[in-house]
Amino acid sequence: MNFTASQIAELVSGTVEGNTSVEVNRLSKIEEGTEGSLSFLANPKYTSYLYTTNASITLVSDAFVAEKEFKTTLIRVADPYEAFSKLLKHYNQIKQQLPSGIAQTALVSEDARVGKSVFIGDFTKVGANTTLEDHVVVHPQAFIGNNVSIGANTVIHTGARVLDDTIIGKNCVIHNNAVIGADGFGWAPNDNGSYDKVPQTGNVILGDHVDIGANTTIDRATLGATKIGTGVKLDNLIQIGHNVEIGDHTVIAAQTGIAGSTKIGTHCQIGGQVGISGHLTIGNRVGIQAKSGILKNIKDDSKVMGYPAFDYTTFNKAYVHFRNLHTHITDLQTLKKKLDHD
Amino acid sequence: MNFTASQIAELVSGTVEGNTSVEVNRLSKIEEGTEGSLSFLANPKYTSYLYTTNASITLVSDAFVAEKEFKTTLIRVADPYEAFSKLLKHYNQIKQQLPSGIAQTALVSEDARVGKSVFIGDFTKVGANTTLEDHVVVHPQAFIGNNVSIGANTVIHTGARVLDDTIIGKNCVIHNNAVIGADGFGWAPNDNGSYDKVPQTGNVILGDHVDIGANTTIDRATLGATKIGTGVKLDNLIQIGHNVEIGDHTVIAAQTGIAGSTKIGTHCQIGGQVGISGHLTIGNRVGIQAKSGILKNIKDDSKVMGYPAFDYTTFNKAYVHFRNLHTHITDLQTLKKKLDHD
Amino acid sequence: MNFTASQIAELVSGTVEGNTSVEVNRLSKIEEGTEGSLSFLANPKYTSYLYTTNASITLVSDAFVAEKEFKTTLIRVADPYEAFSKLLKHYNQIKQQLPSGIAQTALVSEDARVGKSVFIGDFTKVGANTTLEDHVVVHPQAFIGNNVSIGANTVIHTGARVLDDTIIGKNCVIHNNAVIGADGFGWAPNDNGSYDKVPQTGNVILGDHVDIGANTTIDRATLGATKIGTGVKLDNLIQIGHNVEIGDHTVIAAQTGIAGSTKIGTHCQIGGQVGISGHLTIGNRVGIQAKSGILKNIKDDSKVMGYPAFDYTTFNKAYVHFRNLHTHITDLQTLKKKLDHD
């Protein structure tokens, strides 16, 4: 949505100095301003950026006196930081105004139960015996399978696939092209070296306030459920294997993978590109540094790093010496020669 | 699909004790039972779970005598494990009943050759000169390009993209949002520091019984074909570069990446998050531990680990010392001082 | 598109020897020929492959004399390499003939500005206030949000999601199922251990000649823009966090992840599965080996490796000793005993 300088000035009770009809559609820091963005100058330390910023509009204090030329249109206000915060709040209100209604090209099963003020976008398909509670938003080109349950206020983005039997809580967000409930990777080796599929009969259950990042995949359980606790935040491109359980309020950064049947505690912070083997138990409040490889259980409140991972402080002590290993080994070889000569 | 306790009891020739109309739609272990799931109690070691399980229905032996209160509805049978296996088999038969017919909103090129009992879902597009053999299932919102060939009984899931000229064998499964046959990452540097695209004229060929995980990407060849052998199983979020060849019955876990032109043998087991450089040859029956980085060719029957990877046993011997490197280097420095003083 | 041996012979002024109606639809090396492919024999070193190749057609020299049986249909030409190059050029011309027109099932907002010779495929949705410049191609089942700008000649592949406010330059290619402009992973911890969303109000800006791989995700900025410079090439399954900036002509291999607010210079070469922490500055012309973990700023022209990464040459020197650490530590322990006995 575009706003002109005049419209912005009215919102923040300011006065325009420059092009009143210039349009903006996003907010930026002054040093990163681009055409179409609105920024602000509150801290005098940043004044120099005003003369170079490409932001189309900049909020400045009524007291501001320019000392050089500049391109940006000014809006003078009593308190630029307060005015900017007001606009940010306004922006979020607009973004949170969820659409409602069912698009003409959406295909919703007659057996589906659709709550009040639900939105279902174009080319989206909603399966049989599926429940969408009040204020659920399913963006265009998404797929919701059969026997799925989606709690109130949850948003499913374009291209996401929520497969049969999945249960999603309230106030969740499933980002674009995420896949929830696909067949797990279960294979039983045959005597002849080929593999048979182990049937994956379970489902995926997400608590409330769960965020699932773009292109992240969560496999359904072999038996029972793959469970993602309330308040869990998963970044993009994460892999969650079958029968994994993740405790409440654990956050996991992008590209991490968790193999089948591993249980992770509550309030953990797991970095990006971490790999966790299957059938492990990770405690509560555990910190795992980015890129670590976890092959063993981890106790509550531990902080680990490495491939394979162990105690964070010990890893860093060891790694300092690894960086200088060439020098250390040369020392060792000198000592050896010395002693051999004695 | 939901079943009541009465319906289940009839299927397994049992008698209901509790709510005959409670419904289930999936199977679970008794210790992981959730509302809507059916579990069983066969091993007496697990008896305590019966009093706490949230499974809606539990199969128990005719002889079972409860010693405490419980919530689950019982179905009494002669042999609970046998009854559960029977239900599992029944479940799989239902899941394997493939749909057929072409959805009204599907767009199938007039030039496409469509076999018997093929299913093509809503909003799916099938290109010109493409062949779908008998019993192929293409779920909704999938894309099948031009000049593609898909063997009998293969299933393409929602959101998968099978691009021009791809050849897929019989009995394969392509999971959601997988991309098969995209342009490879081939760039020729220019003198001015920019890059020119190297045209990618080849295709992707999959054998029979191949499984491709959700959000996995397989690039087409620069010249010729990227080849995935019969019985190969690829997990989610895997990257296969242009002109890679993977031998029959090799299995690869999630988030592994294989760079261009590398050839991998048959019956290999490759862990998750492994990276394999381009233009390498990996032998047959090779085991690669999760998260390893492969920079060199690997001989048949080897087992490797590390970044960069080398022999598995040697890696683990070295890593034990790495964990204690601080102590070892302190020892070394003590020895050095001692000798310097002598 | 299929061509018969007769059609190919006419294109390259050659003569067919064998089945004039056999069809090919792609090019291959002679040693990798498969049914439906056309290869060539120019270098006599490769002559033995002619007798075993599965290529349907092989270009050979007028002077070629066969010494054994073979299956492939021959096309005799004066210079096989030159003829093959001619066909490759022809192939690329055909592939580059972009379609145009708007598919009947495409949904294009009335507010969108669509240039000349634009193509919009089936089931694709184009949002309000969005601009598609001349010759833009948006393949089927793609999603282009509101207030998006896409420069001339850019190609958006099937299943790609280009979200609100994204700006894409000219001559870019966005591959299948890539997600550009999703919500960044910004979370503010609460006192009670849960997290609040930090609003992500910014956008993504791509320069000209940018390639974004299949299933790659680029998050929009918290404030301002996530910026991908001109000529940048991103492979498949890459994660780019909010507010990241990547300088012109930097290339990044598959499955690499860059955390929020990191700035990367121009002309860098970054391997696959690299992880780069947030808020770092990586210089120009930096080389980062595959699978490295970057935790610190990196100066111009550096080459680094390791987890965590440091100087490439020093890493390799250290790693040689790591491989033999067991032997070194045994030596150390022998010395220690010797001295203790003295």
Image (spheres, coloured by chain):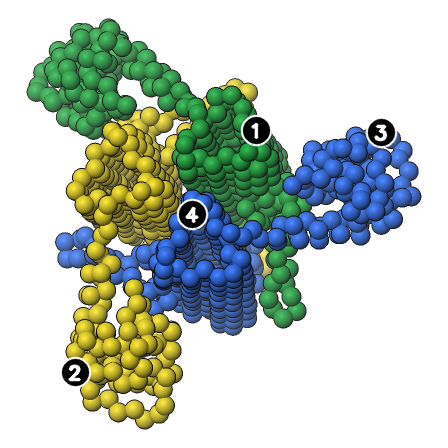
Chain colours: A green, B blue, C yellow
Q: Could you classify mark 4 by the number of other residues whose Cα lies within 10 Å: few (under 14), some (14-19), or many (20 or more)?
A: some
Q: Quadrant of residue B281?
A: bottom left
Which residue is disc 4 drawn over? B106
**Most foreground residue, B228 or C254:** B228
Is the Cβ of the residue at disc 4 closer than 8 Å to that at disc 2?
no
Q: Chain of mark 3?
A: B
Q: Secondary structure at mark 3?
A: loop
Q: Chain of mark 2?
A: C
Please tell me whether mark 1 or mark 4 is closer to you in this view.
Answer: 4
At x 26%, y 9%, the residue is: A12
Q: CA distance from mark 3 to mark 4?
A: 53 Å
Please tell me whether mark 2 or mark 1 is closer to you in this view.
Answer: 1
Please tell me whether mark 3 or mark 4 is closer to you in this view.
Answer: 4
x, y (%) of residue C237? 39, 48
**Position of C218 compared to C99: left or right?**
right
**Position of B176 compared to B7: left or right?**
left
Q: Is residue C341 above or below residue A170?
A: below
At x 24%, y 29%, the residue is: C111
Which residue is disc 1 drawn over? A113
Q: Could you classify mark 1 by the number of other residues whose Cα lies within 10 Å: few (under 14), some (14-19), or many (20 or more)?
A: some
Q: Chain of mark 4?
A: B
Which residue is disc 3 drawn over? B69
Q: Is residue B186 above or below residue A294?
A: below
User: Which residue type does callout 1 highlight?
Assistant: Arg
Q: Quadrant of residue A25?
A: top left
User: Which residue type does callout 3 highlight?
Assistant: Glu
At x 54%, y 27%, the residue is: A114
Which residue is disc 2 drawn over? C78
Q: CA distance from mark 2 to mark 3?
A: 90 Å
Q: CA distance from mark 3 to mark 1?
A: 34 Å
Number of numbered tags placed on the structure image: 4
